[in-house]
Amino acid sequence: MTPLLRQVLSQIDGPDPRVNEVVSALVRHLHAFVEEVRPTDEEWIAGLDFLIETGRVCTPHRNEFILVSDMLGLTSAVDEVNNSGPEGMTPSSVEGPFHSPAPAREPGAWISFGPERERGVPTVVHGRVLDCDGTPLAGATLDLWQANDTGLYDSQDDTQEIGNLRGLFTTDAEGRYWFRTIRPSSYPVPTDGTGGTLLRAIGRHPMRPAHLHYRVAAAGYRPLTTHVFLAGDPFLGSDAAYAVKEELICESRPRGDGEWGMDGPYEEIEFDLKLVPLDWKDEG
Amino acid sequence: MTPLLRQVLSQIDGPDPRVNEVVSALVRHLHAFVEEVRPTDEEWIAGLDFLIETGRVCTPHRNEFILVSDMLGLTSAVDEVNNSGPEGMTPSSVEGPFHSPAPAREPGAWISFGPERERGVPTVVHGRVLDCDGTPLAGATLDLWQANDTGLYDSQDDTQEIGNLRGLFTTDAEGRYWFRTIRPSSYPVPTDGTGGTLLRAIGRHPMRPAHLHYRVAAAGYRPLTTHVFLAGDPFLGSDAAYAVKEELICESRPRGDGEWGMDGPYEEIEFDLKLVPLDWKDEG
């Protein structure tokens, strides 16, 4: 430990012990970073300028710091330290910046109302919300959101009405949910800000594999925020946001049998979600 | 190493090896920080919101990220890794955010032209620019800047003309420089932004001990950016910016003998600066 670092740490003495703990750890890790890479003054200023520029890109509807955090795998790291649980649980995944309140809808409702409905592949999504032991959870709520076939969420796209490709559903007595939509597409994260600058600097593509976002809540269970990814997507191994987990990858199966109230060809995604009881304790 | 961290590191492969090195190190140290403090999602978002807010405070004349970097001792850490040198060298210190181009002035010139000239303690500052072996360096330039008696630089204060309390001087054949000013005062860093939020959170005062800023340049020598601090200042041991080094602390001696063209009581600061040859190599 350098004398400077010792001095900095010795003077951290605020009123909140958790703040002292977090800032002290940040100081230690960032000083270790400086000791290791020995940045020149110009490099350090370039780093601070990157942060200024990241701030400039932020708007009430765009949080570029979250994007940068995602691109460095930090958001997923935070997600992982907060979501250990029992065998069989559905893993969480990052929320991303595009959640907003969704309209409540009846079981089986369409959530696609824009021009993407004509262009996209009609898809039925269904499954159950369960305890980790398989007990169905009735009255659980599922808050769903996805991008359209061009990779845009309603909040990013003036051609979509607010609430398009979003829906709030409630499970029935058997824990079942279902809704109809278009098949999600892979899409690039925004690359016109510093998130894009970072990706180009480290030689990464901006693509996210096709996915649906879920927030699931049931009384007595830990709320779950996660993604469902589509099997076969070419970007599953290199998600720009590092959000993919094996257990979240699901087949989208072609069908054409007129079931689920569907005419003509459609695809079917079946995905069960297993929640962790609030009183679960890690015995590991 | 977590599987996630291994994946993130394995995908860093940009065109510039130094960028890959720096980003990889940053990713490792920040993931280690996350593993250690296990921030909740809310804490992580609070951290990113702090960065957004820091960006909001920045203007073309105010770089709040530099201030935050100073307050965590990071700017001084970067300074230290870049400025090793031989025994006897004058240590560098952080530049701070207030440098701007200074008017060239004749030896002995006053640099104080505002109302602070009436309120402050008249002070003569003089000394020599030398090689580390004591050889005087003629024709070296000294770029000086300081705050007024209320702790404000010209760029922060509409009552000061641009260039007030700044000056560019050249050493004579014996390496000597001298100028007249008011004695610098200790002052608080700006506390109305996130730098202030941080200081309050970690229980630190915002004060910087009284100082003069120097940038010194001489052909064949490493440019030196440093501070001169005044002995006896109550904030020498707890500088908000962690910029104090023992070798940079200097007496300001009361005098009243009519020398240096001064009428009445004044103070004298004598400070020599020893530069490092450009071809110096660390043999350690």
Image (cartoon, coloured by chain):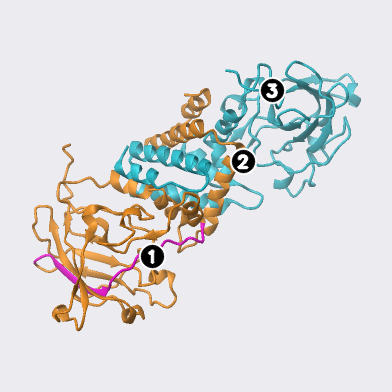
Chain colours: A orange, B cyan
Q: Nearer the viewer, residue A154 or B269?
A: A154
Q: Which residues are magenta?
A: A174-193
Which residue sits at x=43%, y=73%? A157
User: What residue is pinned by disc 2?
Assistant: A42
Helix, strand or loop under label 3: loop
Query: Is residue B54 shown in magenta?
Result: no
Residue A96: give its label: none
Q: CA distance from mark 1 to mark 2?
A: 35 Å
Q: Could one spot residue B40 in this view of the protein?
A: no
Select label 3 or label 1 by which is in front: 1
Indicate the amino acid at tag 2.
Glu
Q: How many marks?
A: 3
Marks 2 & 3, CB-CB < 8 Å contact: no
Residue B90: give its label: 3
Crowd tier of the residue under label 3, counting other residues whose Cα lies within 10 Å: few below 14, some 14–19, many 20 or above: many
> Of label 1 and label 2, which has the lower sequence position?
2
Subunit ID for the residue under disc 1: A
